[in-house]
């Protein structure tokens, strides 16, 4: 197999890892208030992702770094072109990390509530924008002969891309609700179950419209298989979710996300960023890639490290496998106020 | 301002901000791991309390460090896409390796450490904090390797067909002699920062307690932490000097104009080059001839650069001519290229780096002296010195980075004097073509505002938790009982 194809597939795998894992992180965060209803419930929800969210986010940094190393032209055109959406995503991820880590550091309702709003808001933004970004990549954007993006921010806000945003949003909400159903018990579990029940058919419909549009307008015949797998998976998510088999439902929803990535990357190949200006200006796996030497080096690195990462990340999920309920949430550990206590005379 | 200036400001602001936080994470993660190891080995409660105390400060700091690090990964593509196209084949590899080999390790094991106190057997739990610390050290290695390639490109050749630098030898990139001296220098600095942090806070607490009650139960604990921090400072301080000297010698060979600028050495001296302690004159660098040396140490620069008190060191004016001849006198637009970096910035950042780091050295010696033979510190002025010293190594590290990055200008990839002359890139040609002034203004403003707000919370939280002192909880019992409450929850 050509190394450029190997790396095209590897980048797709890294994005799959990111979307499957941070997909439920975002879903949980978006649903914080909805399933939590009050501080204790929100803490139950947040702590289901507590030990793992940070490791999940590294999949994004790896996908970014790997794109830089394997397809520098793609990295350069994509991130300089999709400038403002990426800025919004970055700001969301920045405030999110601080909000999660700091919300419990001060034992005060207002302090916690404000950071919780940040946690929720910073999950909604990337959940929509990743879909918008990927849909635009599939659809193609204006790119000139020097591989420079010539559109504007508004170019990216077309109906197809917005539908892409709605698709990731719905998938992540559903994903998060199922994850919460799987990882909690008690009232949070009940509320998460109800959300999962509603979201599964909505995600199925939106994703189906997006997939068919993609398939007809931009894709090739073989990706119908990915569409079919994703469709079956989403139906099963719904069925198993209703039957209370959340482990199976979660797996099925993850398969649907894999199907979506396969559809997106399958419809792109051999392009990585088609140009709507002139197909001759499209970035392809060949003209955007690094040299064979670099790709060979990076292949070895990936072959050695990806399995190791999967192993220890898998272990961390196993360590924190138990379900959480409000009974498991300890007293607040934070200090009473951010203000300094009255100075004790020395 | 044009896109270039704005993008440079943005890179400077976001990177300096990020790298104020990172040395503390790198150094403190290892120091906390050592504290926890001491607890595991001796079973003494004070080590457990210190682990918890400094561990909490580490986490508050880590959150903002990781958050601001995300920007670094994508900023090259956003503002510096032409740079990314030119270097991606080489430069992307260490970045991707950092994520795969180091960042995953760091982040995953941090989660296990924070939430795993009662879930994992003690030895396994101890391993998680070490994995976190090793991850952050490894992470630094790959980043320094990437940066060193910009200072001294090796293991690559220029492909005229694509107009890009292409990697020919990954091993050469990862064992670049610039990396091999820069990495120890950066790591030693990180330990100087963390040692000062641990010792400074411990001294402040020791004085506070001893002033109230000579036999306060916590005094011995803070004394241990202060001496531990002081020893770390002493060792890492020596390492900073030794590696800094090595690095300077190498830089005189690799980027002579940067080092000449650091010394405000305008004209090549007839004899040995002096080391300037104070120079005044035109700060902007457009009239180097107005620079006057007020106080200087004869021959020291020659010695630092060449190991010989009489060695010849070229001044920036002669180097400008040499660079112009070798790398071109004018841009494609016919403008004359200024190879002399900003003298004011390079000269003063170099001196501030050295001068501010000296604070820590003074503090460490004072701590070890005043705590000798079981003594505790109760002098209020020591408490003040400790607090004043806290930010100094942070600032010194920042000035060091400002020096090395600004001193490389006008290049973003500085040419390697013994390598290919084609592998170099002027900063002005690295900036994105797709990006407008409005784009960069928006992102520069956004990052500055967001970072400022988060910076305020970071400072208040750190200050508040330092002021609270070491907590006094019972060590967690390890249990797999599914009904037990979490030992820690957000």
Image (tube, coloured by chain):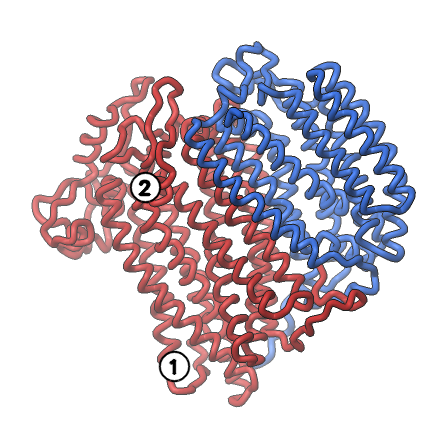
Chain colours: A blue, B red
Of all residues, the one furthest to the bottom in this rendering is B215
| Residue A250 in the image: above or below residue B65 | above
Characterize the local packing of mark 1: few (<14), some (14-19) or many (20 or more) Cα atoms within 10 angstroms.
some
Q: Position of residue B162 (x, y in %)?
A: 40, 20
Mark sitting earlier along the chain (1/2): 1
What kind of element bears circle 2? loop
Residue located 82% across and 30% down the image: A232
Q: In the rendered structure, are the residues bearing label 1 and label 2 in contact, judged by CB atoms less than 8 Å apart?
A: no
Question: Residue drawn at (71%, 33%), measured in percent from left and top?
Answer: A258
Res B182 visible: yes
- In the rendering, which numbered label is found on residue B407? 2
Residue B215 left/right relative to A260: left
Residue assigned mark 1 = B370
The residue drawn where x is 68% and y is 71% is B478
Depth check: B369 or B136 in front?
A: B136
Q: Is residue B401 left or right of A126 when viewed as pictured?
A: left
Q: Residue B327: x, y in percent? A: 25, 27
Q: At which x and y percent is residue B11?
A: 47, 39
Look at the numbered disc 1 and give the secondary structure of its residue.
helix
Q: Give the spatial CA distance, label 1 vs label 2.
A: 40 Å
């Amino acid at each position: 197999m050509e190394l450029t194809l190997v790396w095209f597939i590897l980048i797709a795998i890294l994005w799959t890892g990111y979307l499957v894992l941070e997909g439920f992180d975002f879903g949980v965060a978006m649903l914080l208030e909805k399933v939590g209803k009050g501080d204790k419930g929100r803490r139950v929800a947040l702590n289901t992702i507590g030990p793992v969210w940070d490791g999940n986010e590294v999949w994004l940094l790896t996908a970014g770094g790997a794109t830089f190393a394997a397809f520098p032209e793609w990295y350069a055109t994509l991130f300089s072109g999709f400038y403002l959406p990426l800025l919004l995503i970055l700001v969301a991820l920045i405030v999110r990390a601080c909000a999660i880590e700091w919300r419990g550091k001060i034992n005060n309702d207002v302090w916690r509530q404000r950071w919780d709003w940040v946690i929720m808001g910073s999950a909604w933004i990337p959940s929509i924008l990743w879909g918008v970004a990927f849909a635009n990549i599939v659809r193609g954007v204006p790119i000139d002969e020097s591989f420079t993006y010539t559109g504007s921010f508004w170019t990216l806000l077309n109906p197809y891309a917005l539908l892409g945003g709605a698709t990731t949003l719905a998938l992540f909400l559903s994903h998060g609700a199922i994850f919460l159903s799987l990882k909690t018990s008690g009232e949070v579990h009940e509320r998460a179950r109800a959300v999962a029940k509603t979201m599964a058919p909505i995600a199925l419909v939106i994703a189906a419209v997006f997939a068919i549009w993609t398939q007809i307008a931009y894709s090739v015949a073989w990706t119908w298989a990915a569409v079919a797998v994703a469709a079956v998976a989403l139906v099963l998510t719904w069925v198993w979710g209703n039957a209370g088999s959340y482990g199976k439902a979660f797996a099925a929803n993850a398969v649907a996300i894999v199907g979506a990535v396969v559809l997106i990357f399958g419809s792109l190949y051999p392009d990585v960023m088609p140009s709507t200006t002139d197909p001759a200006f499209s970035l392809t796996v060949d003209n955007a890639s690094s040299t064979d030497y670099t790709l060979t080096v990076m292949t070895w690195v990936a072959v050695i490290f990806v399995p190791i990462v999967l192993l220890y990340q898998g272990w961390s999920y196993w360590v924190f496998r138990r379900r959480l309920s409000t009974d498991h949430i300890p007293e607040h550990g934070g200090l009473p106020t951010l203000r300094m206590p009255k100075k004790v005379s020395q | 301002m044009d896109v270039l200036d704005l993008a440079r400001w943005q890179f400077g602001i976001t990177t300096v901000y990020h790298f104020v936080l990172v040395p503390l994470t790198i150094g403190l993660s290892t120091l906390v791991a050592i504290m926890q190891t001491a607890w595991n080995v001796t079973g003494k409660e004070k080590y457990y309390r210190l682990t918890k105390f400094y561990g909490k400060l580490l986490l508050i700091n880590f959150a903002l460090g990781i958050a601001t690090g995300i920007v670094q990964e994508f900023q090259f593509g956003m503002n510096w896409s032409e740079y990314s196209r030119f270097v991606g084949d080489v430069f992307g590899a260490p970045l991707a390796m950092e994520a795969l080999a180091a960042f995953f390790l760091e982040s995953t094991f941090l989660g296990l450490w924070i939430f795993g106190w009662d879930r994992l057997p003690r030895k396994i739990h101890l391993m998680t904090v070490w994995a976190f610390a090793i991850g952050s050290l490894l992470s630094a290695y790959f980043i320094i390797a990437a940066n060193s390639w910009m200072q001294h490109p090796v293991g690559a050749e220029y492909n005229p067909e694509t107009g890009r630098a292409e990697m020919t030898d990954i091993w050469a990139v990862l064992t670049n002699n610039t990396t091999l001296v820069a990495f120890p220098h950066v790591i030693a600095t990180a330990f100087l920062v963390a040692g000062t942090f641990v010792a400074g806070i411990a001294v402040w607490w020791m004085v506070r307690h001893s002033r109230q009650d000579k036999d306060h139960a916590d005094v011995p604990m803070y004394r241990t932490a202060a001496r531990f921090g002081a020893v770390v400072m002493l060792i890492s301080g020596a390492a900073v000097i030794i590696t800094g000297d090595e690095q300077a010698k190498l830089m005189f060979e690799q980027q002579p104009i940067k080092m000449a600028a650091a010394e405000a050495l305008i004209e090549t001296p007839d004899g040995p080059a002096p080391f300037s302690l104070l120079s005044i004159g035109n700060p902007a660098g457009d009239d180097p001839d107005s620079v006057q040396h007020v106080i200087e140490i004869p021959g020291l620069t020659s010695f630092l650069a060449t190991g010989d008190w009489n060695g010849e060191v070229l001044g920036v004016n002669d180097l400008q001519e040499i660079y112009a001849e070798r790398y071109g006198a004018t841009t494609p637009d016919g403008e004359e290229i200024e190879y002399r970096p900003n003298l004011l910035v390079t000269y003063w950042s170099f001196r501030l780096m050295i001068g501010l780091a000296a604070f820590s050295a003074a503090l460490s010696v004072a701590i070890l002296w005043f705590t000798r033979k079981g003594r505790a510190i109760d002098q209020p002025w020591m408490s003040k010195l400790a607090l004043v010293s806290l930010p100094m190594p942070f600032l010194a590290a920042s000035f060091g980075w400002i020096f090395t990055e600004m001193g490389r200008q006008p290049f973003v990839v500085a040419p390697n004097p013994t390598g290919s002359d084609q592998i170099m890139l002027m900063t002005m040609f690295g900036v994105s073509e797709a990006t407008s002034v409005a784009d960069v203004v928006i992102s520069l403003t956004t990052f500055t505002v967001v970072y400022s707000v988060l910076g305020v919370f970071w400072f208040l939280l750190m200050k508040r938790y330092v002021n609270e002192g070491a907590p006094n909880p019972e060590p967690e019992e390890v249990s797999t009982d599914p009904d037990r409450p979490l030992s820690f929850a957000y």
